């Protein structure tokens, strides 16, 4: 079935025009666009009941089989490129992303709802930087060599093979490049499976890989539903790496498949980050930052969703926090005056509301918000004071504009509360004391801790989570090592001319 809006030319991809941009909606396998008997709808969170944005190819086990086969061939070609040649292709892809930033941002905003200006100025640009960073890292990489026990020892990185890259629906373009860049830089071929709630920007990227100069099969894109084509991809024994970003529930399924085939697997999973505010903080900066945790309707894994505030300043903090939140404008993500974008999908908004309703029924106090917004996919910025640290809204990731407020009486209690969930992705701390910044920063169990700031990170620094927030680290050399098989080569001294 082809959608009414689809344009098809024999031998080419079916395409839809989305926000004035022509988007291919098929799979990209072995350097060719291939169609699909079945399709799924992509709708816009900005106009949910409006026309369907696109009908996208819905892959199955046969698609997965073909994509992995193409990636096996693509691996042979791409891994034979020299490091300098690989870097050149990656840099060309970065140039192409930069040249198409507006188009990618437009499509992504319509497809998943995040703010257009933030996409255009920050997230899509960061996508290009991801490829540049890895181009630089592979050409400046030094191999280790040493002499010991009469041997000349060197350590080499071998490309591992085809890698499956599975990504979530939030910030899909940037998050995908984050995983694709190191896999490709290492010399692996990739099969990318983007999320079914935001599949379109990945298709634009696939299209750019052709002009960038990747050989056929180095970069493959498979569209579809996670439990269908995603599960088939990760179960294929020809796959040699799996890198996943998404929920812990899905990671458990993928991890089982990885174990069956003895394939290394990294997982960037959910978060339930604390935002700690000590009495010695710049209170207005802390309140402002706390209010901004509603950004993108809280659909951000790194968000500091548990506000932990020193008891002596609770009321003053809350007053300032409310003042900042009152100023936030919920609206259309394309409008520069909007602060808060709609949620991605009605199903997700209902799920978020379910958390709030259960909290209300369980006796937690709703301090503000707590209802969906009529006529759009927004949810009111919500603040809940839980009856207990065991409340579900404190312990489980909600992934929406819902924060909790708890108080602590001293540093030890603050750290204990911060570390009291199964997650451990990130934390934000506000204090003006250098000693406290150091002590609390060290005591918190999380992959990333920001003090008096948020979200900034050099792309070469490690990124990942503790506990159920993930397995492994991305960023810089960490991701390159994951995508490589290390080899120690030992040559007996004096045995060769
Ligand atoms: P999800 O786990 O539902 O889906 C993620 C991807 O997995 C999608 O592409 C989906 O199609 C695929 N998938 C689902 N079932 C599968 C299966 N059985 N086999 C193979 N693939 C399968 O997650 P989501 O709802 O798309 O994303 C939200 C989650 O992602 C949140 O928990 C959020 O915190 C997390 N996240 C984490 C980070 C991070 O860097 N730590 C970044 C963004 C999002």
Image: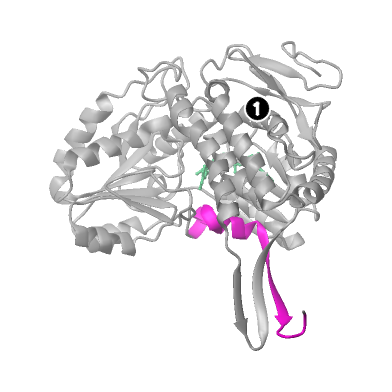
Confirm whether the magenta stretch covers residue 479: yes
**Quadrant showing the N terminus:** top right
Q: Is residue 377 above or below residue 196?
A: above
Q: Can you tell me which quadrant of the image ligand 1 is in?
A: top right
**Which residues are the magenta region?**
467-496
Q: Residue at x 44, y 28 (%)?
A: 121
**Quadrant showing the C terminus:** bottom right
Q: Is residue 371 above or below residue 491?
A: above
Residue 133 seen in this snapshot: yes
Left or right for 184, reference 10: left
**Residue 297, percent from left and from top:** 42, 31
Residue 245 seen in this snapshot: no
Confirm whether the magenta stretch covers residue 256: no
Q: Residue furthest bottom?
A: 149
Q: Residue at x 37, y 58 (%)?
A: 420
Residue 401 quadrant:
top left
Q: Nearer the viewer, residue 451 or 294?
A: 451
Q: Residue at x 26, y 23 (%)?
A: 327
**Residue 429, percent from left and from top:** 28, 51
Residue picked out by circle 1 = 204
**Residue 74, percent from left and from top:** 80, 45
Q: Secondary structure at mark 1?
A: helix
């Amino acid at each position: 079935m082809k959608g009414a809006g689809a344009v098809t030319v024999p031998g080419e991809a079916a395409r839809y025009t989305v926000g004035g941009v022509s988007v291919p909606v098929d799979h990209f396998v072995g350097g060719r666009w291939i169609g699909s008997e079945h399709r799924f709808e992509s709708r816009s969170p900005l106009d949910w009941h409006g026309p369907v944005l696109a009908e996208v190819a819905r892959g199955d086990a046969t698609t997965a089989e073909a994509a992995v086969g193409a990636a096996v061939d693509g691996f042979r070609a791409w891994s034979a490129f020299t490091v300098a040649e690989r870097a050149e292709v990656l840099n060309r892809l970065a140039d192409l992303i930069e040249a198409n930033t507006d188009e990618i941002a437009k499509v992504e905003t319509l497809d998943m709802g995040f703010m257009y200006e933030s996409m255009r100025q920050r997230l899509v640009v960061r996508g290009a930087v991801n490829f540049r960073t890895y181009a630089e890292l592979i050409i400046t990489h030094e191999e280790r060599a040493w002499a010991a026990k009469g041997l000349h020892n060197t350590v080499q990185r071998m490309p591992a093979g085809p890698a499956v890259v599975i990504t979530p629906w939030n910030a899909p373009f940037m998050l995908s490049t984050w995983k694709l860049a190191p896999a490709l830089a290492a010399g692996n071929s990739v099969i990318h499976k983007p999320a079914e709630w935001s599949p379109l920007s990945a298709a634009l990227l696939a299209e750019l890989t052709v002009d960038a100069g990747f050989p056929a099969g180095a970069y493959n894109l498979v569209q579809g539903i996670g439990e269908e084509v995603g599960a088939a991809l990760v179960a294929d024994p020809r796959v040699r790496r799996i890198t996943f970003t998404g929920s812990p529930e899905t990671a458990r399924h993928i991890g089982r498949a990885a174990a069956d085939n003895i394939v290394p697997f990294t997982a960037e999973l959910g978060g339930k980050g604390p935002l700690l505010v000590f009495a010695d903080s710049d209170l207005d900066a802390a309140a402002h930052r706390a209010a901004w945790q509603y950004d993108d309707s809280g659909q951000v894994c790194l968000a500091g969703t548990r506000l932990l505030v020193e008891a002596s300043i609770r009321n003053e903090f809350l007053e300032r926090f409310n003042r900042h939140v009152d100023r936030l404008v919920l609206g259309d993500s394309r409008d520069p005056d909007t602060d808060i974008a709609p949620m991605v999908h009605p199903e997700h908004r209902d799920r978020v509301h379910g958390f709030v309703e259960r909290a209300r029924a369980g006796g937690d106090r709703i301090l503000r918000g707590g209802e969906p917004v009529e006529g759009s996919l927004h949810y009111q910025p919500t603040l809940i004071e839980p009856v207990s640290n065991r409340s579900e809204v404190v312990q489980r990731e909600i992934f929406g504009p819902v924060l909790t407020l708890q108080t602590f009486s001293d540093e030890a209690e603050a750290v204990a509360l911060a570390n009291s969930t199964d997650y451990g992705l990130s934390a934000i701390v506000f204090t003006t004391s250098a000693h406290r910044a150091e002590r609390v920063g060290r005591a918190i169990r999380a992959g990333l801790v920001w003090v008096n700031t948020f979200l900034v990170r050099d792309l070469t620094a490690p990124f990942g989570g503790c506990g159920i927030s993930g397995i492994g680290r991305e960023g810089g050399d960490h991701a390159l090592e994951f995508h490589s098989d290390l080899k120690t080569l030992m040559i007996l001294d004096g045995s060769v001319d």
